[in-house]
Amino acid sequence: MTANCLPNTTCDTTPVADTSSNDYLTTDQIIEIAIYIFCFALAAPLNVISLHKTFRAFRAHKAKSPILLLRINLNIADIMTIFLFVPKQVIWILTYGWYGGELLCKIMAFFATFSFYLNSFVIACIAIDRVYGAYNISSLTAHRKSYIRCRTLLACGWLLAFILSIPQVLIFRLFQPFPGSSFKQCTSFWKEVEHVKMTEAEQSGVSQERHDQLYQEVLKLIRIEQVYSITHLMFLFWLPCLVIIGSYLTVLCILQGHLKNESRLTPPNSLHLNEDSFANVQIEIRPENGDAIANGSTARLNTRFACSKEDVLSTPESTPVRIGSLKKKQHQKIGALSVTTIHKAKQHAKRQATWIILAYLLIWSPYNVFTLLNMTGAKELLWLKPYFINLSFLHAAMCANPIANPLIYGVFQRPNRK
């Protein structure tokens, strides 16, 4: 039996021998198991620690943090992959057959697919949320709206992952290929039908007409399987990948636009509203007219409360200065961020976007690219054959994504408490 699985779609488990156990492991199988064990050993503690720290920080926040909510969901998706998919793959390779029964076969097929879908969709949600965050970078109500938006995006991501994983329950089943043998396999419906038809076609006494008919039916079944697998790959990787790349390019364009506008509008003699400018400024709201007064206090003003360039004038510290009227409407924007602040935000977004995109592409692309080529007939090209032979290794390497995610999204970062 060969086990060359698409990432959580139809698993190419074609029975070719009447055996119930693996008498020995091949070198390829040993390497594949080693990759899975390595990923499990690193990703399991990283994600458990990350989930614990992130959930504790989320509960400690006075205002619900959207980015922490996104990280929690990403941790859940990674934990599903590490604790459900990886052990299943290792046990499957070691035992060769399937001994968990049909119900467990369907459950594992569902969650193996669901965890990978959820992982991609949560990363896409993070990318989309940061587009809105960059667009509303100086809005007072952006934080509150961002949390509601993240909950909506995540609900859509979970629902879509659930819907796209349901076909796995219908497609995968327990199959006993050899009558009278205890050997069973958890395989797809079309692999089962393909095996039955090919077995019949190879029997003696089958007419040429019947043989050709069975062969055409198998080809038709293979085409249906390819359509399903390509659709699966589109939703699993290619569409989320386009969303992620497009979102971060949009973020950089928006921040670049903010920076250019601020540089053009800010007079050369005006006081730049960077973070250091607020080190000795305190805002006092007068109840009679809502005006704000600046005085020489050591209190630090949150940079979200940035005022426009007309609001602050260069004056001695001892002289209170009126710096503008603060509207009581929560939806009003106080003003643009300073050139320095926007520049820092742009650089931070660049670095994080680069790491996120590189990690996602480097870990997911090799397997998905060669699997797509394999399904579209490119496997006949001689120079590509060595890569197709190593598809199982690339499949196992995808489980390194749960290692990268906690590192990128801050497992060692100390959360800011508000």
Image: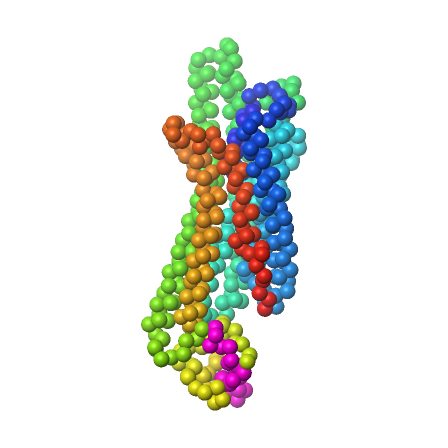
- The residue lying furthest to the left in this view is 264
Query: How far across and down, in percent of the image, does residue 373 sit?
Result: 41, 34
Q: Position of residue 122 (x, y in %)?
A: 52, 52
Residue 58: horizontal and vertical position, in percent?
Answer: 61, 61
User: Which residue range is magenta in the image?
Assistant: 275-297
Q: Residue at x 50, y 52 (%)?
A: 123
Occupied quadrant, residue 255: bottom left
| Frontmost residue, 169 versus 414 | 414
| 296 magenta-colored | yes
> Would you say residue 112 sits in the magenta stretch?
no
Q: Is residue 290 visible?
A: no
Q: Position of residue 301 (x, y in %)?
A: 52, 76
Question: Which of these two is toward me, 323 or 136?
Answer: 323
Vertical placement of residue 85 versus 248, above or below: above
Image point (49%, 17%), residue name: 201
Instruction: Judge whether 349 appears above or below 215 on screen.
Output: below
Looking at the image, which residue is at 48% across and 81% down? 326
Query: Which quadrant: the N terminus?
Result: top right
